[in-house]
Image (tube, rainbow, N blue to C red):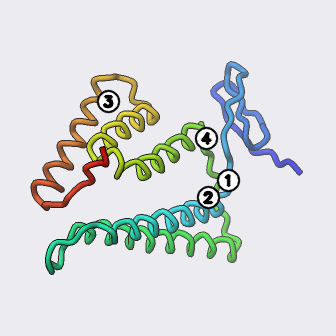
Amino acid sequence: MSTSVPVFTESSMSTSTPGEKETPNEKKEWYIALRSETADLIAASILILGSSWYIIQAMGFPTRGSAWVQAHTFPIGIGILAILSAIALGFFAIRRILTRQRLEVIEIHKPLIVFFGLVCTLAYAMVLNWLGFYLTSAIFTMVFGYVAGIRKLWALFALTLGFLAFTKLIFEMTLGTPLPTGAW
C-alpha cells in the first residue's frame, strides 16, 4: 500500500510517493520520510543506548584522590541528562501515538550523508583511546565539517584549530582533565 504525500516544487505542485521528490529539473531527490512520533522514538532509543555506553566508558576514567569532581564527573552528568531527555522525548512520542495526536512527517534529505555522519561519530569513539584525543578530534572535526557542508579548506582548519584550542584551554589547562593520549 503506497500513500502519496504532497510535495511542492518551485514550478508546480505535484504528488510523489514517500521517499522521492520531484525537482524542477525532473531529477528525483531521495529522502526518508517518517512520522515525527516514529522519528522521536528512534532518536530516543539511539540516545539512550549511546548515553549509556558513554556513561559506562566515563566510569573507567582515572580518579585522583578523593575529590568530589573527577575526570568522569562531567561526562557522567551529561550522559544522565541525555538519558533523561531521551526518556522525555520517548514519553511525549508515545503520548501522541496513544492520543492519536499526529504531527507532521519528518523528511531526512540526503540520508547517506546523515548515516555517514553517524558512522564517523561511532568511529571517533572507537579510535579515541588508540589515536589519542587531539589527533582523533582533528581528523573527526575535519571529516565531519566536510560532511556537514563546509567546503573551504581554511574554514575546516579554523574550525579544527578553534575546537582543539578550546578543549586544551578548558579541559586540560583549566579543569585539569586528562584526555586520552593514544596507544602509539
**Residue ID at (27%, 35%):** 159
> How far apart, in angstroms, are the residues tagged by discs 2 and 4?
13 Å
- Within 10 Å of disc 4 (Cα), the crowding (few <14, some 14-19, many 20+) is few
Instruction: Name the spot of residue 21 as percent of width and height, x first.
Output: 70, 34
Q: Is residue 4 above or below residue 180?
A: above
Say which amino acid is labelled 2.
Answer: Ala
- Within 10 Å of disc 1 (Cα), the crowding (few <14, some 14-19, many 20+) is some
Q: Which mark is residue 111?
A: 4
Seen from this angle, which residue lies furthest top?
A: 25
Q: Is residue 176 above or below residue 134?
A: below
- Left or right of 181 on screen, residue 19: right
Please report whichever mark, 3 or 4, sits nearer to the chain's N-terminal start: 4
Judging depth in this view, the residue of 124 and 47 nearest the camera is 124
Q: Tell me the residue that label 1 is attached to.
A: 34
Q: Which mark is residue 156?
A: 3
Please report whichever mark, 1 or 2, sits nearer to the chain's N-terminal start: 1
Give yes or no for contact between labels 2 and 4 (Cβ–Cβ under 8 Å). no
> How far apart, in angstroms, are the residues tagged by discs 3 and 1?
32 Å
> How far apart, in angstroms, are the residues tagged by discs 4 and 1?
12 Å
Of circles 2 and 3, the one toward us is 3
Instruction: Name the spot of residue 129 as percent of width and height, x first.
Output: 34, 52
Please report whichever mark, 4 or 1, sits nearer to the chain's N-terminal start: 1
Seen from this angle, which residue lies furthest right?
A: 1
